[in-house]
Image (cartoon, rainbow, N blue to C red):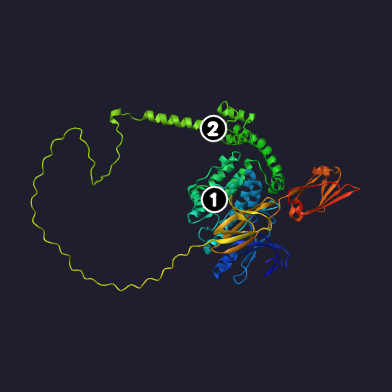
Amino acid sequence: MIGSVLDKYEVLEKVGEGGMATVYRGRHATLNRDVAIKVLHPHLSSSTRNRKRFAREARAIEHLRHANILEIFDYSGTDAGECYIVTEFVMGDTLSALLWRRGRLPPEVAASIALDLARALSYAHREGILHRDLKPDNVMIRFDGTVKLMDFGIARFLDESQVTMTGALVGSPAYMSPEQAKEGKLDVRSDLFSLGTLLFQTTTGQLPFSGSNPSVILKNIVEGNRPAVVELVPTIAPALADVIERLMATQREDRFDSAEALVHALEGVLAESGIDRSRAEWTLSAYLEAPEAWEQRLEAHLRTFLLASGKRLLEGGDHLAALRLFNRLLSMDAENAEVLALVGQLHGAVRPARRVGLLLGVATTAVLVCALLAAWLASPRRPAAAIAAPQPEVPEVVASVPAPVAPAAPLPAAPQPPAPVPMPAAAPLTDPPIRRVSPPEPEPPPPVEAPVAELPGTLTIVTGVPADVYNGTKKIGQAGRKIELLGSYSLTVKSDLFLPAQVDVVVGSQETRQVDVALQARPRTVYLQGFEEACLVVLDGLPRGTVASTGGRVPVERPEIGAKLVVDCGATDHTFTIQPADFYLGDKTVRPR
């Protein structure tokens, strides 16, 4: 495929692969513009019926124009050799990749991403389009911080095409709404539930619903079996916790009515934390550039802002709202003397490390106990002898052999029944004459073929380097070797020298598949030893500062392609050509030659 031309698009390189399609970077031949070309797998595009459905879905969503929705430029016709869709090319990472690197995101970062996604959904819903498959893999974050929602309408195309197999599901079970899990009718609130699941994951670092297989996960979704978000992240903004719990309500009537209402709620979350996204220090791009510094800046800001806001709420008489902010501050610093003193003014003496929630819980319990005691005292009394426990109803049981029971005292003989009176014999009964009609001879049923059990297919993941393949936390094989699978999987390829890569695949019965995965090497560091501090460091032609300013450490983001390092000490230049193999054992140390 690489090097070929699809209509007016030149295919340049492969950038990813999932269970639905392979994605390539391409270039428009006349406009000289980079594009993304998503080519559907043959098992999805092999039939004319599926091609027509795909074209219909593409036409339905091609008019979507929103800053937070991936723009569609073109799509193949039903007669094209390959079935593909052309979109804008996004220089960035998926939300899945960001979560993999960071584990979980600060609540304010998660709320900022969710706000952009809610705006995208609000626009799409007004246009009559549901997403139906909202998950981190379908969210791109451009390097400048712009959030892009992808793959609108694809879930419906897959659903209508009925591309299912034994053990496989259409869509992503962990992000489905209860009504979607029960195959019920969907509306905008189903997308909002999926967004709530995504928001839960970004703030806690784990999915809300778990299980050993998709059936267990769907059962937990329908029943609402999950932890509360505040149990996993006590430092979460109270308003954000409320938003997540409302989004993930089991009954759709308890969720937000629209994405627009969610937009207003998330704007309130950021306002409660004093985060203005128009300021450079609070942009998403600033977080992507230096996440640790962003988080430290956020914590220092919250300690000051939440305390000042809580004081204003106290002065205004809104004690409950003030307690919510103080509760978050105590989650961050349980020994904060000023906050404890303010809480003590409301509830009396508060010992260190006591949470406000405990005080409120004790007070509530005391009121409830008093109410129950008063109700009991006010109820009418009856003598103890007059109160009998209700007897359960016992159904009649006819036993073939009754068990002997010894009577407590001899009983008087029962009177004998009178002798039976002989009855005249009844006339014998005869059946009325029945006219019998012979039915026509039935046609012999067609022969029934015995069901053929579906045998697993084989998958080979090619990486070019030693790597292991995992399904969740379970290792199922190695790269370069055949793995028996049947159904839809989200696999992870891991290697000590490279960053993990996620691969979404669908393997049919007795199908043989090979997936090429380009692993990105883990960033490495070149350590400078024995050089003068004033020497200038140049990496791949770009100045990086002096030895002193770099601390003698030069990061290399792409060790798989090597690096050229020059240490310019004025009279003497030290040039090092570092090969990819030099990083195989870890970081590299260089010294003056």
Check disc 1 and report the residue beneath it: 193
For mark 2, give the secondary structure: helix
Q: Residues within 10 Å of mark 1 (few under 14, many from 20)?
A: many
Q: Position of residue 200 (x, y in %)?
A: 58, 46
**Mark 2 or 1, nearer chain start:** 1
Counting every numbered tag in the picture gives: 2
Q: Name the residue type under label 2.
A: Leu
Q: Is residue 128 visible?
A: no
User: Picture coordinates of residue 183 (x, y %)?
Assistant: 48, 56
Residue occupying the far top of the picture:
349
On the picture, is 356 further left or further right than 536? left
The quadrant in which the N terminus is found is bottom right
Category of crowding for the residue at label 2, using alpha-carbon neighbours closer than 10 angstroms: few (below 14), some (14–19), many (at least 20): few
Q: Quadrant of residue 372?
A: top left
Q: Is residue 335 above or below residue 419?
A: above
Task: Give x and y (percent) for residue 464.
Answer: 69, 58
In this picture, residue 208 sits left or right of residue 22: left
Q: CA distance from mark 2 to mark 1?
A: 30 Å
Residues at badges 2 and 1 in contact (C-beta under 8 Å)? Answer: no
Q: Amino acid at mark 1?
A: Phe
Near-viewer residue (460 or 387): 460
The x and y percentages for residue 415 are 11, 40
Residue 394, labelled with which disc? none
Q: Residue at x 73, y 65 (%)?
A: 32
Is 333 left or right of 448, judged from the image as shown?
right
Please determine whether, in this image, residue 22 is positioned above or below residue 274. Answer: below
Q: Tell me if I can see residue 235 in this picture.
A: yes
Residue holding disc 2: 358
